[in-house]
Image (cartoon, rainbow, N blue to C red):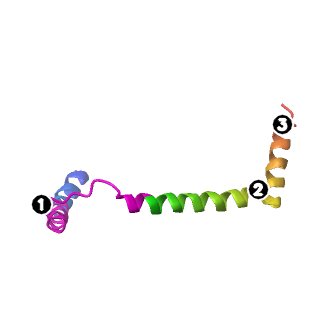
Amino acid sequence: MEKNVMTRVLSPVRRIWQDRIGRLMGPGRRDQGMTTSEYAVGTIAACAFAAVLYKVVTSGAVLSALQSLIKDALDAQF
């Protein structure tokens, strides 16, 4: 019963938002993917994140912690 009440309440709200988005986008405009510039910015951001992550993982403190973790895992007694 609770689900039906929520559906009745949210259905008009959803329809209103879809109508507004449809008017903003226009009848022939559809956002179907990234443009070349968006791909370029996304690629640069991914490379920058990878470089920062590489620096963090190869830092002395993290490297020694990882080595200690692997050593403890391999030396575990079963």
Residue depicted at x 15% and y 61%: 15
Please tell me whether residue 30 belongs to the stretch shown in magenta: yes
Going from N to C along the chain, the mark reached first, 2 or 1, is 1
The crowd level at tag 2 (other Cα within 10 Å; few <14, some 14-19, many 20+) is: few
- Residue at 72% across, 60% down: 55
Q: Are marks 1 and 3 in contact (CB under 8 Å)?
A: no
Dot 3 falls on a residue whose secondary structure is helix
- Which comes sooner in the sequence, label 2 or label 3? 2
Task: Give the distance between the C-alpha atoms of the residues marked 2 and 3, in whole angstroms.
Answer: 21 Å
Q: Position of residue 27 (x, y in %)?
A: 12, 60
Place of residue 47 in the rendered image (x, y in percent of width and height, measured from the top left): 57, 58
Between the residue at mark 2 and the residue at mark 1, the CA separation in whole angstroms equals 52 Å
Instruction: Calculate the distance from the C-alpha at mark 1 to the C-alpha at mark 3.
Output: 62 Å
Of badges 1 and 3, the one in the foreground is 1
The region drawn magenta spans: 13-39
Q: Amino acid at mark 3?
A: Leu
Q: Amino acid at mark 2?
A: Thr
Disc 1 is placed on an element classified as: loop
Category of crowding for the residue at label 3, using alpha-carbon neighbours closer than 10 angstroms: few (below 14), some (14–19), many (at least 20): few
Give whichever of discs 1 and 3 has the lower sequence position: 1
Residue under label 2, please give it.
Answer: 58
* Disc assigned to residue 74: 3
Quadrant occupied by the C terminus: top right
Which residue is depicted at the point 18% across and 61% down? 18
Q: Main secondary structure of the magenta part?
A: helix
Which residue is denoted by mark 1 in the rendering?
27
Secondary structure under the numbered disc 2 in the rendered image: loop
Front-most of residues 66 and 73: 66
